[in-house]
Amino acid sequence: MRHFAIVGSGPAGFYTAEALEKAYGEAARIDIIDRYPVPYGLIRFGVAPDHQSLKAVSKRYDKVAECAAVDFVGNVYVGSDVSVAELLDLYDGVILATGAPHDRKLGIPGEDLPGVVGSAEFVGWYNGHPDFADLDPPLDGANAAVIGNGNVALDCARILSKTRHEFEGSDIVGHALEALERSSVKTVTILGRRGPHQIAMTPKELGELGHLEAALPIVEPGDFPPIEADEPLEPGLRKSVSLLRGFADLEANKAKRIVFDFFAKPVRIEGDGKAERIIVEKTVVDESGAARGTGETYAVPASLIVTAIGYSTSPIDHVPFEGGKFVNQGGRISDRLYAVGWARRGPSGTIGTNRPDGYEVAGLIAAAMPSGSAGDREGASGLKALLEGRGVMPTDFDDWRKIEAAETANARQGSPREKFCRPSGWFGVLGR
Ligand code: NAP
């Protein structure tokens, strides 16, 4: 019997568990460990609450959870409750699938002013992440800015612009829904340091902006190169650029605006004790594709500034870490220690990208420890004893199902669930 520990229960963790289960069948036990008592990581805390079709992928993970060989060990923080070295003693292989939960910093003056929040914080706030439930982003000003030209920037701008009615069918948490309904934000400026040809936004996500009830996307036609220049673009990007161009033709009298401000590099954030404006420098994109400052600056008013410029992984003691992710070769960090997903590659790609990634690493593991080969590690029983000795009470899949049922029972009308955002909610359901 082989024992594997996967640290992190987001998409990368679950695809790896699925792959290991397929490779080993009954010849392995797989424990998916998570610091939270509830599974699914990015699906629960990162994917936009109005993108329920993306969240539905968790049904596939439910199937993995039903496999006899797979267990969930929630409420266990690897790094403090148990170390990676201890897991390596107990398990034949340890796979880090810890994602990239931290915001990258802009590194400009004023970044620490109240009113400037990272997208991990902002997204966590509207998704019921316990660390950010109390974020209380300032929504009492007319202007907000989102920095970055990726899909997360789009998520943040869209959530800031939707009406209560448009959140029907989403699982946005109640505190965010109410705050957004009271919001005074009328203009959301999306700042890109480069141009329309350099966006990292995908067509489906961009297209949604054209159909919002109360908000109109606005682009400046002069920011675009001649239309022939779109021809050599990769088809997905060409479609995104074409959608962006189309925003110039939209005519509607709507109360809110989402303004695309390209060639605008953040220089500093200013305000009297809180963010009031962001100073940007106009750029040109040079031959190599990099943004070069022109020296010309201007101010964009914003009392809420969300930075959506990418994420990094949490380092773990004694695991080599560089450039925001674990140092690895093709997923292998060192003997019997592996990384998958964003912890392996950095924060790029869709949820589905993690599937081949998890299968590849499971293949490496199966090649190193063929199914049927003997192992002599203790696995789950050893972990349970160790955690008990430390007063840590893990949750399992049955606990999660109870929490899920309570969240579903608590749902507002039109919402699939009302998520518990605080440990007291989770443990209240479990009577702990
Ligand atoms: P991303 O796609 O890497 O985009 C980051 C953006 O931040 C880029 O436009 C980048 O500009 C900009 N940026 C980086 N540093 C900057 C700086 N110092 N100043 C100004 N701008 C800066 O990252 P993301 O939006 O966080 O998304 C992460 C991954 O999740 C992506 O693969 C994304 O597609 C995926 N995702 C998918 C969905 C979906 O499918 N619905 C939703 C959300 C996220 P440069 O290009 O100039 O560096």
Image (spheres, grey):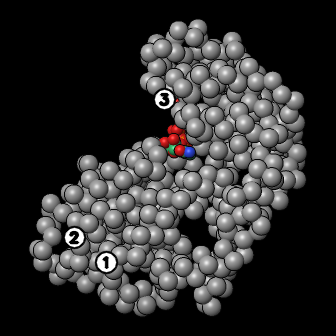
Query: Does label 1 point to a residue whose CB lies under 8 Å from ligand 1?
Result: no
Q: In terms of depth relative to the viewer, which is nearer, 429 or 329?
A: 429
**Where, quadrant-wise, is the N terminus in this rendering?**
bottom left
In the image, residue 56 sits, relative to residue 397, either above or below, namely above
Q: How far apart are marks 3 and 2 (CA)?
A: 38 Å
Provide residue 306's location: percent of width, then percent of height.
69, 43
Residues at circles 1 and 2 in contact by the CB criterion of under 8 Å: yes
Residues at circles 3 and 1 in contact by the CB criterion of under 8 Å: no
Which quarter of the picture shows residue 45? Answer: bottom right
101 relative position to 262: left or right? left
Q: Please give the residue where the numbered disc 1 appears in the rendered image.
A: 69
Query: Does label 2 point to a residue whose CB lies under 8 Å from ligand 1?
Result: no
Q: Distance between the residues labelled 3 and 1?
A: 39 Å
Provide residue 329's location: percent of width, then percent of height.
25, 48
* Helix, strand or loop status at disc 3: helix
Question: Residue sitting at 64 percent across and 68 percent down?
Answer: 130
Whether residue 281 is visible: no
Provide residue 98's location: percent of width, then percent of height.
44, 60
Question: Residue sitting at 68 percent across and 58 percent down?
Answer: 170
Q: Please give the residue where the numbered disc 2 appears in the rendered image.
A: 24
Q: Please give the residue where the numbered disc 3 appears in the rendered image.
A: 236
Question: Residue sitting at 61 percent across and 78 percent down?
Answer: 405
